[in-house]
Image: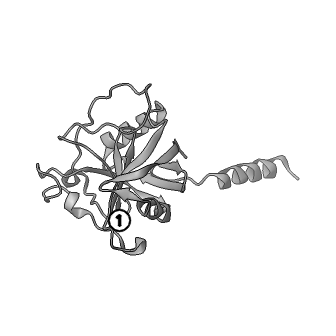
Amino acid sequence: MSKYLIIILTAFMASCGHPQYKDPHVVIETTFGDIELELYPGKAPKTVAAFLANIDAGVYKNASFYRVLKAEDLPTDFNTGIIQGGVWKGENLSAKPLHGIDHESTKQTGLSHIDGTISMARKDTGTATTEFFICIGDQSSLDFGRKGNPDGQGYAAFGTVFKGMDIVRKIQAQKSSGENFLNKIEIRSIRKI
């Protein structure tokens, strides 16, 4: 076999192991399975950069999904709402206080809070740091100009679930009291692909 053919085959086999995507992908590893996200730096550059910096800094060590919005009387396959995660209810004592991310509204990004959208949780605009949520079903009321929050600025959507909506729904279906899971859903890691 010629040396050039070996080089070409080696390069081809190496590229087969890890898909190449236009936009960055990350995996949220949970006790229920993996959720792969595709992030949109071309639309929400500041939010994506901050989320990736949090991953690089190890901020999400001891993170969890701790909050849920759902209709208690609907079966999992038809339920809508969100699951929220991060370190707010965690024990990451090494996490340093972070500066708020400049708010990138859905009016700026052109994104919407539809099924599978990942977005940053916040109080006031510019206060989002580490907490995020994943939409289940149409949550466009959380977009700019809608009534999903008092200031009308909406939340900063920055990506979507690429694989694993079945895991998102499985997490949403866990027992809860009000808006809190009875048992936090462990996030083992969040890593870049």
Q: Is residue 122 shown above or below 95? A: below
Q: How far across and how far down the image is residue 28, in percent?
A: 50, 49
Which of the 4 image quadrants contains residue 102?
top left
Is 57 above or below relative to 81? above
Rendered location of residue 170, percent (x, y): 47, 63
Front-most of 53 and 30? Answer: 30
Rendering coords of residue 66 (x, y %): 39, 48
Q: Residue at x 34, y 42 (%)?
A: 131
At x 11%, y 51%, the residue is 150
- At numbered mark 1, what does the secondary structure look like: helix, strand or loop? loop
**Near-viewer residue (84 or 37):** 84
Mark 1 = which residue?
115
Q: Residue 190 appears at what percent x and percent y?
A: 50, 43
Crowding at dot 1, Cα within 10 Å, few <14 / some 14-19 / many 20+, comes out as: some
Q: At x 39% / y 74%, what residue is drawn?
A: 75
Q: Tell me the amino acid under the disc marked 1.
A: Asp
Model colouring? one colour
Is 27 positioned to the left or the right of 88 in the image? right
